[in-house]
Amino acid sequence: MPKILVVDDNPDIVDLFDIVLSRKGYTVTKAGGGGQCLEILKTSIPDLVLLDIMMEPMDGWETLQRIKSDVRTKSVPVIMLTGKPPTWDEIIAHMDNIEDYAIKPVTIEGLLSLVQVFFQNQETLIRELAQAKSAGADAALLEEYRILRRSIGSGKTMQKVLGHQKDTIDKVLAEMDERLRVLRTKYRVMEPAG
Protein backbone atom coordinates (compact mmCIF):
# COMPACT_ATOMS: atom_id res chain seq x y z
CA MET A 1 0.00 0.00 0.00
CA PRO A 2 1.09 3.59 -0.55
CA LYS A 3 3.13 5.36 2.13
CA ILE A 4 1.85 8.70 3.44
CA LEU A 5 3.77 11.15 5.61
CA VAL A 6 1.43 13.30 7.75
CA VAL A 7 3.03 16.56 8.96
CA ASP A 8 1.24 18.76 11.50
CA ASP A 9 2.29 20.37 14.78
CA ASN A 10 -1.06 19.37 16.32
CA PRO A 11 -0.54 15.80 17.62
CA ASP A 12 -4.30 15.15 17.77
CA ILE A 13 -4.65 15.81 14.03
CA VAL A 14 -1.62 13.66 13.23
CA ASP A 15 -2.98 10.79 15.35
CA LEU A 16 -6.48 11.07 13.83
CA PHE A 17 -5.11 11.06 10.26
CA ASP A 18 -2.91 8.08 11.18
CA ILE A 19 -5.89 6.09 12.48
CA VAL A 20 -8.15 6.93 9.53
CA LEU A 21 -5.56 6.29 6.81
CA SER A 22 -4.11 3.17 8.46
CA ARG A 23 -7.58 1.62 8.65
CA LYS A 24 -7.82 2.03 4.87
CA GLY A 25 -4.52 0.19 4.42
CA TYR A 26 -2.14 3.11 3.93
CA THR A 27 1.24 3.02 5.66
CA VAL A 28 1.45 6.22 7.70
CA THR A 29 4.49 7.99 9.11
CA LYS A 30 3.90 10.92 11.47
CA ALA A 31 5.89 14.15 11.84
CA GLY A 32 5.18 16.81 14.44
CA GLY A 33 6.57 19.66 12.35
CA GLY A 34 8.66 20.73 9.39
CA GLY A 35 12.02 19.85 10.92
CA GLN A 36 10.92 16.32 11.79
CA CYS A 37 9.45 15.94 8.30
CA LEU A 38 12.79 16.80 6.70
CA GLU A 39 14.62 14.37 8.99
CA ILE A 40 12.23 11.55 8.04
CA LEU A 41 12.69 12.34 4.34
CA LYS A 42 16.44 11.76 4.69
CA THR A 43 15.80 8.03 5.18
CA SER A 44 12.31 7.33 3.84
CA ILE A 45 10.55 8.68 0.74
CA PRO A 46 6.73 8.47 0.93
CA ASP A 47 4.28 8.32 -1.94
CA LEU A 48 2.48 11.41 -0.59
CA VAL A 49 3.04 14.11 2.04
CA LEU A 50 0.08 15.75 3.78
CA LEU A 51 1.64 19.01 4.99
CA ASP A 52 0.05 21.58 7.30
CA ILE A 53 0.80 25.21 6.46
CA MET A 54 0.40 26.87 9.85
CA MET A 55 3.17 25.34 11.97
CA GLU A 56 5.95 26.70 14.12
CA PRO A 57 8.84 27.27 14.10
CA MET A 58 9.04 26.17 10.43
CA ASP A 59 5.78 26.70 8.56
CA GLY A 60 4.50 24.50 5.76
CA TRP A 61 5.62 26.84 2.97
CA GLU A 62 9.22 26.77 4.17
CA THR A 63 9.03 23.00 4.63
CA LEU A 64 7.65 22.65 1.09
CA GLN A 65 10.44 24.84 -0.30
CA ARG A 66 13.06 22.67 1.40
CA ILE A 67 11.43 19.46 0.15
CA LYS A 68 11.34 20.77 -3.43
CA SER A 69 14.90 22.15 -3.35
CA ASP A 70 16.40 18.76 -2.43
CA VAL A 71 17.13 16.63 -5.50
CA ARG A 72 16.17 13.44 -3.59
CA THR A 73 12.74 14.73 -2.56
CA LYS A 74 11.75 17.31 -5.18
CA SER A 75 9.38 14.91 -6.93
CA VAL A 76 7.59 13.83 -3.73
CA PRO A 77 3.91 14.77 -4.10
CA VAL A 78 2.61 17.21 -1.46
CA ILE A 79 -0.94 18.16 -0.51
CA MET A 80 -1.12 21.28 1.65
CA LEU A 81 -3.50 21.42 4.60
CA THR A 82 -4.55 24.74 6.07
CA GLY A 83 -7.03 26.30 8.44
CA LYS A 84 -7.25 29.43 6.28
CA PRO A 85 -7.23 29.77 2.51
CA PRO A 86 -3.84 30.61 0.98
CA THR A 87 -3.37 34.05 -0.54
CA TRP A 88 -3.18 34.60 -4.29
CA ASP A 89 0.57 35.23 -3.99
CA GLU A 90 1.03 31.92 -2.13
CA ILE A 91 -0.96 30.08 -4.77
CA ILE A 92 1.10 31.49 -7.64
CA ALA A 93 4.38 30.91 -5.79
CA HIS A 94 3.64 27.27 -4.97
CA MET A 95 1.16 26.08 -7.62
CA ASP A 96 3.79 24.08 -9.50
CA ASN A 97 5.01 22.32 -6.35
CA ILE A 98 1.84 20.95 -4.82
CA GLU A 99 -0.79 18.46 -5.83
CA ASP A 100 -3.72 20.03 -4.04
CA TYR A 101 -4.96 22.04 -1.06
CA ALA A 102 -7.37 20.95 1.65
CA ILE A 103 -9.02 23.45 3.96
CA LYS A 104 -9.29 22.27 7.58
CA PRO A 105 -11.25 21.06 9.31
CA VAL A 106 -11.23 18.07 6.99
CA THR A 107 -13.87 15.41 7.57
CA ILE A 108 -12.88 11.75 7.61
CA GLU A 109 -14.74 11.27 4.33
CA GLY A 110 -13.08 14.37 2.90
CA LEU A 111 -9.62 13.15 3.90
CA LEU A 112 -10.16 9.72 2.40
CA SER A 113 -11.60 11.18 -0.78
CA LEU A 114 -8.68 13.60 -1.11
CA VAL A 115 -6.14 10.78 -0.78
CA GLN A 116 -8.03 8.35 -3.02
CA VAL A 117 -8.51 10.96 -5.77
CA PHE A 118 -4.81 11.83 -5.58
CA PHE A 119 -3.73 8.21 -6.10
CA GLN A 120 -6.28 7.73 -8.92
CA ASN A 121 -4.92 10.86 -10.61
CA GLN A 122 -1.38 9.53 -10.19
CA GLU A 123 -2.33 6.31 -12.01
CA THR A 124 -3.88 8.34 -14.84
CA LEU A 125 -0.80 10.57 -15.06
CA ILE A 126 1.52 7.55 -15.24
CA ARG A 127 -0.51 6.17 -18.17
CA GLU A 128 -0.50 9.56 -19.94
CA LEU A 129 3.26 9.98 -19.49
CA ALA A 130 3.86 6.48 -20.86
CA GLN A 131 1.75 7.34 -23.93
CA ALA A 132 3.64 10.60 -24.48
CA LYS A 133 7.01 8.89 -24.03
CA SER A 134 6.15 6.17 -26.54
CA ALA A 135 5.13 8.92 -28.99
CA GLY A 136 8.56 10.56 -28.68
CA ALA A 137 8.27 13.11 -25.86
CA ASP A 138 11.64 13.78 -24.25
CA ALA A 139 12.30 14.03 -20.51
CA ALA A 140 11.90 17.83 -20.42
CA LEU A 141 8.49 17.68 -22.09
CA LEU A 142 7.36 14.85 -19.83
CA GLU A 143 8.33 16.97 -16.81
CA GLU A 144 6.48 19.99 -18.24
CA TYR A 145 3.41 17.80 -18.80
CA ARG A 146 3.57 16.48 -15.23
CA ILE A 147 3.90 19.99 -13.78
CA LEU A 148 1.03 21.31 -15.91
CA ARG A 149 -1.28 18.52 -14.72
CA ARG A 150 -0.28 19.19 -11.10
CA SER A 151 -0.73 22.97 -11.41
CA ILE A 152 -4.09 22.66 -13.13
CA GLY A 153 -5.34 20.35 -10.37
CA SER A 154 -4.29 22.60 -7.52
CA GLY A 155 -5.51 25.68 -9.39
CA LYS A 156 -8.98 24.20 -9.83
CA THR A 157 -9.18 23.67 -6.09
CA MET A 158 -8.29 27.32 -5.59
CA GLN A 159 -11.04 28.40 -7.99
CA LYS A 160 -13.48 27.11 -5.39
CA VAL A 161 -11.67 28.65 -2.42
CA LEU A 162 -10.82 32.11 -3.77
CA GLY A 163 -14.03 33.18 -5.45
CA HIS A 164 -13.14 36.88 -5.48
CA GLN A 165 -10.09 36.23 -7.66
CA LYS A 166 -11.69 33.55 -9.78
CA ASP A 167 -11.24 35.46 -13.06
CA THR A 168 -7.48 35.65 -12.57
CA ILE A 169 -7.26 31.94 -11.76
CA ASP A 170 -9.49 31.14 -14.75
CA LYS A 171 -7.06 32.98 -17.06
CA VAL A 172 -3.99 31.19 -15.66
CA LEU A 173 -5.72 27.81 -15.88
CA ALA A 174 -6.94 28.47 -19.43
CA GLU A 175 -3.35 29.13 -20.52
CA MET A 176 -2.16 25.93 -18.81
CA ASP A 177 -5.04 23.92 -20.28
CA GLU A 178 -4.14 25.16 -23.78
CA ARG A 179 -0.48 24.17 -23.37
CA LEU A 180 -1.54 20.76 -22.03
CA ARG A 181 -3.90 20.33 -25.03
CA VAL A 182 -1.01 21.10 -27.41
CA LEU A 183 1.20 18.51 -25.70
CA ARG A 184 -1.60 15.91 -25.69
CA THR A 185 -2.19 16.44 -29.41
CA LYS A 186 1.49 16.40 -30.34
CA TYR A 187 2.26 13.25 -28.36
CA ARG A 188 -1.08 11.49 -28.93
CA VAL A 189 -2.01 11.32 -25.26
CA MET A 190 -5.57 10.20 -24.67
CA GLU A 191 -7.43 12.69 -22.49
CA PRO A 192 -8.78 11.00 -19.35
CA ALA A 193 -12.50 10.26 -19.33
CA GLY A 194 -14.71 12.46 -17.15
Image (cartoon, rainbow, N blue to C red):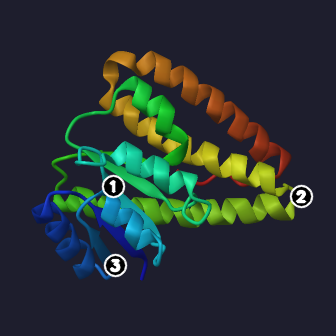
Q: What residue type is labelled 1?
A: Leu
Badge nearest the viewer, 1 or 3:
1
Residue in the picture at 56% in, 52% down: 69
Q: Which amino acid does label 3 sit on?
A: Tyr
Question: Residue 142's spot in the image, x, y percent?
Answer: 75, 54
Indicate which disc residue 26 carries: 3
In the figure, is residue 188 to the left or right of 6?
right
Residue in the picture at 39% in, 69% down: 39
Badge nearest the viewer, 2 or 1:
1
Which residue lies under the disc numbered 2? 136
Which residue lies under the disc numbered 1? 51
Q: Distance between the residues labelled 1 and 3?
A: 16 Å
- Residue 44 against residue 132 in the figure, above or below: below
Secondary structure of the residue carrying tag 3 is: loop
Quarter of the image for the N terminus: give it.
Answer: bottom left
Outermost residue, left side? 12
Question: Residue 94's spot in the image, x, y percent?
Answer: 48, 38
* 2 or 3: tag closer to the N-terminus: 3
Residue in the picture at 21% in, 67% down: 17
Few, some or many residues within 10 Å of mark 2 (<14, 14–19, 20+): some
Residue 116 seen by the camera:
no
Indicate which disc residue 40 carries: none
Few, some or many residues within 10 Å of mark 3 (<14, 14–19, 20+): some
* 2 or 1: tag closer to the N-terminus: 1
